[in-house]
Image: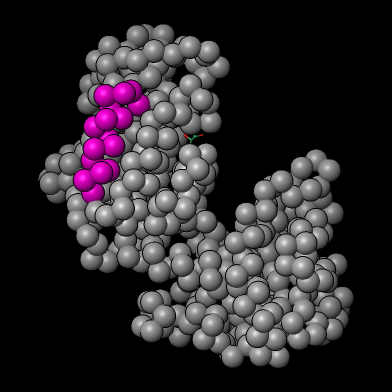
């Protein structure tokens, strides 16, 4: 347990990499503009500590990633080329891109990498073997390296050839800096945390969140529910939601959840007031009590009274996991609830504060508070599976 990683997983700094070929699975699934420029390079920048560490130690780095959904077919639309170019800019090292994920050309590029240099395989999903976790494809990738490093937490919940299948065919393996931090911090949420332990859950769909809610019920002292999913819970409690987004078919699930929470003594905080408007495109909004939502109104954010109550619960917690915005934070009119949760988390310096989920990570960035919480996970789905206690394929592969 010297490095803080559970289950005997090695940190990249513990691996013998000098002069060896090190395959690094990265998550370079970044947004591109129409003219094929990387519009947000955060995922590339996030891997620089691992890559610089390896290059400083004289490793020969071979990068593998997926990009988009080419569905097992070669498609120039999804070439890694603009991504390799951006990486070369950021790293200030030449990056040689193979024109295929595996094959004679790829093998030549890999064989030609010198100490302290970087090669990148073409989009791994150009080959159907990647997503199928095909053994032959996995063995071929493994044959390109002596050491395997996974720094792609965002895809760790998928059992693909580059995240899981190839690992057993490589003698030495470990976690890169991004992966190691994710495992370290998220594992703390599964252990003996400081209490009260609070989960703040919001977002769009009950069906996306019910598993994580059920799992959190076993661990937390209280749950705050906001966002569109709160509508379904409010309706389950007999409120009239007007034109708000409600998942009627999930009402039994919501009622069952609320009953289980009572049984376990977990306090569930629901909104008492909401910001309502006639629709997403509305230019004005008002505040309504959850007992007074008009037939034509849509609840699009939590209201001021709820903000005060929720922020207070966050302030008193000593561990907070947040997934899912409190409202339609993409619109300034409906961002206040989400921004208030972000601020309350950032201000709570006594607590372990963790944010998971793609939109929630975007929300804390919008608030300018990424550096003020303990951890913002780089994985959406992966972080939600992790906090449920699911053993992610890509992490399990790094053990032993
Ligand atoms: P995450 O990616 O963090 O897991 P989700 O994808 O579950 O979060 O939810 C994010 C989306 O939920 C946002 O696009 C946001 O606009 C939407 N949302 C939140 N509250 C509401 C609401 N009251 N009505 C409609 N949409 C909402
Ligand atoms: Mg989302």
Where in the figure is residue 280, as x and y percent of width and height?
52, 19
The residue closer to the viewer here, 160 or 398, is: 398
Q: Is residue 21 visible?
A: no
Residue 306 inside the magenta-drawn segment: yes
Most frequent secondary structure within the magenta stretch: helix
In the rendered view, would you say 322 is above or below 157?
above
Q: Is residue 305 visible?
A: yes
Residues drawn in magenta: 302-317
Is residue 148 left or right of 79 when viewed as pictured? left
Is residue 252 left or right of 341 when viewed as pictured? left
Q: Quadrant of the N terminus?
A: bottom left
The residue closer to the viewer here, 242 or 29, is: 29
In the rendered view, would you say 235 is above or below 147?
above
User: What residue sits 76% from the left and 58% below the top?
Assistant: 86
Where in the figure is residue 334, as x and y percent of width and height?
45, 24
In the rendered view, would you say 234 is above or below 351?
above
Is residue 295 left or right of 133 when viewed as pictured? left
């Amino acid at each position: 347990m010297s490095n803080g990683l559970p289950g005997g997983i090695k940190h990249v700094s513990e691996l013998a990499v000098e002069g060896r070929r090190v395959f690094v699975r990265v998550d370079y699934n970044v947004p591109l503009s129409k003219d094929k420029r990387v519009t947000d390079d955060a995922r590339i920048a996030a891997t620089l500590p691992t890559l610089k560490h390896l290059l400083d130690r004289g490793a020969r780095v071979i990068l593998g990633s997926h990009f988009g959904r080419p569905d097992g077919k070669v498609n120039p639309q999804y070439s890694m080329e603009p991504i390799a170019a951006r990486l070369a800019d950021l790293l200030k090292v030449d990056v040689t891109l193979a024109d295929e994920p595996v094959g004679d050309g790829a093998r030549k590029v890999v064989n030609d990498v010198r100490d302290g240099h970087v090669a990148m395989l073409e989009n791994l999903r150009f080959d159907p073997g990647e997503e199928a976790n095909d053994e032959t494809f996995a063995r071929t990738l493994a044959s390109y390296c002596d050491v395997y490093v996974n720094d792609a937490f965002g895809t760790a919940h998928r059992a693909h050839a580059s995240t899981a299948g190839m690992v057993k065919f490589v003698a030495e393996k470990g976690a890169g800096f991004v992966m190691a931090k994710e495992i370290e911090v998220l594992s703390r949420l599964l252990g003996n945390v400081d209490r009260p332990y609070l989960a703040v859950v919001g977002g769009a769909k009950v069906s996306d969140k019910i598993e994580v809610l059920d799992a959190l019920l076993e661990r937390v002292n209280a749950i705050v529910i906001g966002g569109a999913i709160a509508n379904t819970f409010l309706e389950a409690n007999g409120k009239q939601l007007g034109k708000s987004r409600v998942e009627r078919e999930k009402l039994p699930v919501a009622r069952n959840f609320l009953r289980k929470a009572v049984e376990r003594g977990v306090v569930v905080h629901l909104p008492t007031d909401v910001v309502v408007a006639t629709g997403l495109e509305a230019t004005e909004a008002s505040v309504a009590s959850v007992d007074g939502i008009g037939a034509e109104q849509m609840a699009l954010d939590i209201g001021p009274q709820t903000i005060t109550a929720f922020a207070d619960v966050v302030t008193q917690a000593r561990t907070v996991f947040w997934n899912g915005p409190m409202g339609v934070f993409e619109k300034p009119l409906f961002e206040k609830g989400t921004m208030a949760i972000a601020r309350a988390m950032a201000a709570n310096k006594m607590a372990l504060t963790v944010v998971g989920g793609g939109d929630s990570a975007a929300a804390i960035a919008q608030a300018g508070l990424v550096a003020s919480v303990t951890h913002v996970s780089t994985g959406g789905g992966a972080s939600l599976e992790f906090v449920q206690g699911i053993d992610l394929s890509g992490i399990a592969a790094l053990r032993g």
